[in-house]
């Protein structure tokens, strides 16, 4: 616009140049006559724009726990010089182990780490001539210890203590209520480590029989170690317990443990209708008086026998010194 205006002025006026600018035009030749309205301008002559290095940002520092990976979100920009080319690349700048990138040449990618520790990852951007870098620190925590259910314990819910001989409760174990001393029972899952996120129990066909988040992890539940009484039905049962890293059976599942056990009926007494034998002995002079209330009396010359029956008898027997046998017993 200014150049065009200057050209127009040059067509209709005869300007006079001086070392300091353009004097006002005059209507006459040789800058004579009345002077018109002058125009003053300024201008700067510059060279071509200089190439600038790209700008780059590797994102915020972060912390992860193995076996998890880091999600990287970088950014980069350039002025388009010299040839409108911008490339980016992720690399490990420092750290104790190896780093595996999902795609090292994209701004947004993932990074996996071989061991725990502090890592510095570098994002480099280049326009083919100039380059810039930005670093991000990723703190990698070690993986939590492997979780597992290591054993089960049969619990007396009346005393809140494990039952001897059934802690641990071995797979294939058989017991009666009489043999364990009570029908008020519970079963505790013992874990490695001793505290986990939670434990889910499966019993027989019920795959979610119960879930315990706070130790002790009890099949039938508890209140601060006061076990809830539970009476299993007679027969063979299948019990499975699975540890989890989070509460309420959430997070990573650990190694489960599965066992079978049998609750048997109590055996019938050997003498269900007979009274136990009774033997009373007292000295009567040189003889012995044996009183038998029930059973069969037997005699022998030695404890090893052989024993011979003297027949069923109820009442008193008098054993004189001249009796051939030296030993007597009563059998049911």
Image (cartoon, grey):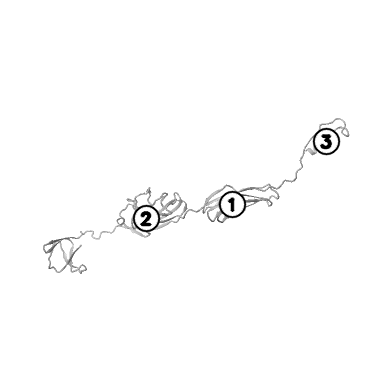
Label 2 environment density (alpha carbons within 10 Å; few <14, some 14–19, many ≥20):
many
- The residue carrying mark 2 is 153
The N terminus is located in which quarter? top right
Quadrant containing the C terminus in the rendered view: bottom left
Say if residue 137 shows up in the picture: yes
N-terminal of the pair, mark 3 or mark 1, is: 3
Residue 328 percent location from the top left of the image = 17, 65
Residue 330: image quadrant is bottom left
Q: Looking at the picture, tell me which residue is in the foreground, 209 or 22.
A: 22
Measure the alpha-carbon separation of dots 3 and 1.
65 Å
* Residue hosting label 1: 121
Q: Is residue 281 above or below residue 186?
A: below
Q: Are marks 2 and 1 in contact (CB under 8 Å)?
A: no
Q: Is residue 273 left or right of residue 134?
A: left
Taking the image as shown, residue 69 lies to the left or right of residue 316, namely right
Pick the front one: 310 or 321: 321
User: Judging from the image, what secondary structure is the residue with disc 1 in?
Assistant: strand
Identity of the residue drawn at 80% across and 38% down? 4
Up/down of 22 relative to 237, above or below: above
């Amino acid at each position: 616009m200014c150049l065009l205006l200057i050209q127009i002025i040059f067509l209709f006026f005869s300007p006079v140049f001086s070392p300091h600018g353009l004097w006002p035009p005059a209507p006459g030749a040789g800058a004579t006559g009345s002077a018109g309205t002058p125009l003053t301008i300024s201008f700067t002559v510059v060279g071509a724009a200089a190439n600038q290095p790209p700008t780059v940002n590797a994102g915020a520092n972060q912390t992860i726990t193995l076996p998890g990976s880091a999600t990287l979100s970088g950014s980069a920009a350039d002025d388009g010089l010299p040839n409108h080319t911008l490339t980016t690349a992720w690399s490990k700048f420092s750290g104790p182990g190896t780093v595996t990138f999902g795609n090292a040449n994209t701004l947004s990618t993932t990074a996996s780490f071989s061991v725990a520790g502090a890592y510095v990852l570098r994002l480099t951007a280049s326009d083919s001539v100039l380059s810039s870098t930005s670093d991000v620190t990723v703190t990698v925590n070690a993986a939590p210890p492997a979780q597992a259910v290591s054993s089960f314990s049969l619990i007396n819910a009346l005393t809140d203590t494990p039952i001897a001989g059934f802690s641990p409760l071995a797979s294939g174990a058989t017991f009666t209520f009489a043999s364990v001393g009570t029908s008020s029972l519970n079963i505790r899952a013992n874990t490695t480590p001793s505290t986990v996120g939670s434990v889910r129990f499966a019993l027989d066909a019920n795959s979610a029989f119960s879930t315990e988040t706070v130790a002790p992890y009890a099949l039938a539940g508890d209140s601060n170690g006061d076990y809830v009484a539970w009476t299993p039905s007679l027969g063979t049962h299948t019990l499975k317990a699975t540890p989890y890293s989070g509460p309420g059976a959430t997070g990573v599942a650990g190694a489960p443990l599965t066992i079978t056990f049998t609750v048997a009926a109590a055996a019938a007494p050997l003498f269900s209708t007979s009274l136990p034998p009774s033997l009373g002995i007292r000295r009567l002079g040189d003889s012995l008086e044996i009183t038998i209330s029930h059973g069969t009396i037997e005699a022998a010359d030695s404890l090893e026998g052989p024993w011979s029956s003297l027949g069923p008898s109820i009442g008193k027997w008098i054993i004189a010194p001249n009796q051939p046998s030296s030993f007597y017993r009563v059998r049911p």
